[in-house]
Image: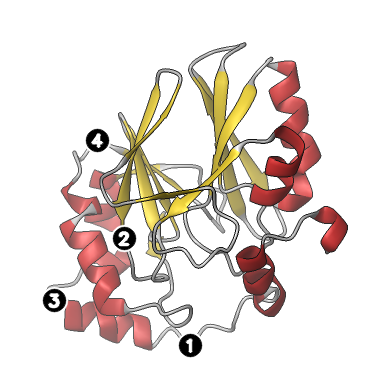
């Protein structure tokens, strides 16, 4: 299997390129538009055909590469059915499967960070977007976020996955590339709570500044802007 984890320094975003092997079909999760040329070069070097590109949610800290990749490769743009994007080709429901030549992902609807957040389970690993981070969780104070929904998504969905499941988030700010469900359950400070009210209390007191690109990125990602439109 081909599994490439790429990093955007400006937004601390992880992007994933996945395929069952050289010369086969591929998918990309959470691409950043600034790195489109890099993604295309990797695809070409590995003789991969990009057929699907997925965003875990409408990102507020960068402009997605979803639409530029579609423009260049004619790949199918995929998001969860709750997404407000106006350019999605395939909207996935909770528990629905995404197949790309011997690769299968299951969508898990995990609202809380935003109301359109989905995670994607692939065998021994789960791509958690901003819902579950390494030693943290996604903020819940904009884009119809909800601490109570996030608690349910975390404790009643993600933390019920097998404990050895690898966690691959959409962001990390401390140089960590992956974790596991077991590690996060036992060590993530935001998960050491006894109730949804206690979790909501933590999240309501974070007092974080809005992402620097929020006012640009959110509308751009809803409208599906490409490089020539930015």
Task: Report helix, strand or loop for mark 2.
Answer: loop
Secondary structure type for disc 1: loop
Instruction: Measure the C-alpha gap from mark 2 to mark 1.
Output: 23 Å
The residue sitting at 50% across, 42% down in the picture is 177
Q: Which residue is mark 2?
A: 110
Q: Residue 25: tell me if it is visible.
A: yes
Above or below residue 172? Residue 5 is above
Q: Residue at x 18, y 83 (%)?
A: 197
- Work out how far the residue at label 3 is from the one at label 4, CA to CA, in angstroms: 24 Å
In depth, the one of 61 and 10 nearer the eye is 61
First reached walking from the N terminus: tag 4 or tag 2 = 2
* Pointer 1 local density, CA inside 10 Å: few below 14, some 14–19, many at least 20: few
Q: Quadrant of the C terminus?
A: bottom right
Residue 86 horizontal side relative to residue 159, left or right:
right
The reply, left or right, for residue 141 in relation to residue 40 is left
The answer to whether residue 61 of the structure is visible from this angle is: no
Residue under numbered circle 3: 195
How far apart marks 4 and 2 lie (CA) works out to: 20 Å
Mark 3 neighbour class, 10 Å CA radius: few under 14, some 14 to 19, many 20 or more: few
Residue extending furthest toward the right? 228
Whether label 4 touches label 1, CB < 8 Å: no
> Which numbered disc, 3 or 2, marks the residue that appears first in the sequence?
2
Q: Nearer the viewer, residue 6 or 44?
A: 44
Q: Residues within 10 Å of mark 2 (few under 14, many from 20)?
A: many
Closer to the chain start, of discs 2 and 1, is: 2
For mark 1, what is the residue? 207
Which quadrant of the view contains residue 225?
bottom right
Disc 4 marks which residue?
A: 164
Query: Disc 1 to disc 3, how far (Cα)?
Result: 21 Å
Residue plotted at (62% across, 36% down):
75
């Amino acid at each position: 299997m081909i599994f490439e984890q790429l990093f955007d320094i400006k937004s601390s975003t992880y992007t994933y390129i996945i395929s069952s092997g050289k010369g086969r079909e591929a998918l990309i999760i959470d691409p950043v538009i600034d790195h489109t040329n890099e993604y295309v070069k990797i695809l070409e070097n590995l003789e991969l055909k990009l057929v699907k590109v997925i965003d875990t949610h409408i990102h507020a800290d960068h402009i997605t590469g979803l639409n530029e990749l579609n423009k260049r490769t004619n790949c199918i743009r995929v998001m969860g059915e709750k997404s407000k994007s106006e350019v999605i080709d395939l909207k996935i429901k909770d528990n629905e499967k995404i197949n790309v030549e011997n690769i299968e992902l299951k969508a898990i609807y995990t609202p809380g960070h935003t109301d359109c957040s989905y995670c994607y389970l692939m065998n021994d690993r789960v791509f958690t977007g901003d819902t579950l981070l390494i030693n943290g969780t996604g903020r819940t104070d904009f884009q119809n976020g909800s601490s109570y929904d996030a608690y349910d998504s975390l404790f009643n969905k993600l933390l019920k996955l097998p404990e050895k499941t690898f966690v691959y988030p959409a962001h990390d700010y401390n140089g960590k590339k992956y974790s596991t469900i077991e590690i996060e359950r036992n060590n993530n400070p935001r998960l050491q709570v006894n109730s949804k009210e206690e979790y909501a209390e933590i999240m309501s007191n974070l007092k974080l500044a809005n992402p620097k690109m929020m006012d640009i990125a959110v509308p751009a990602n809803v409208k599906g802007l490409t490089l020539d439109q930015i």
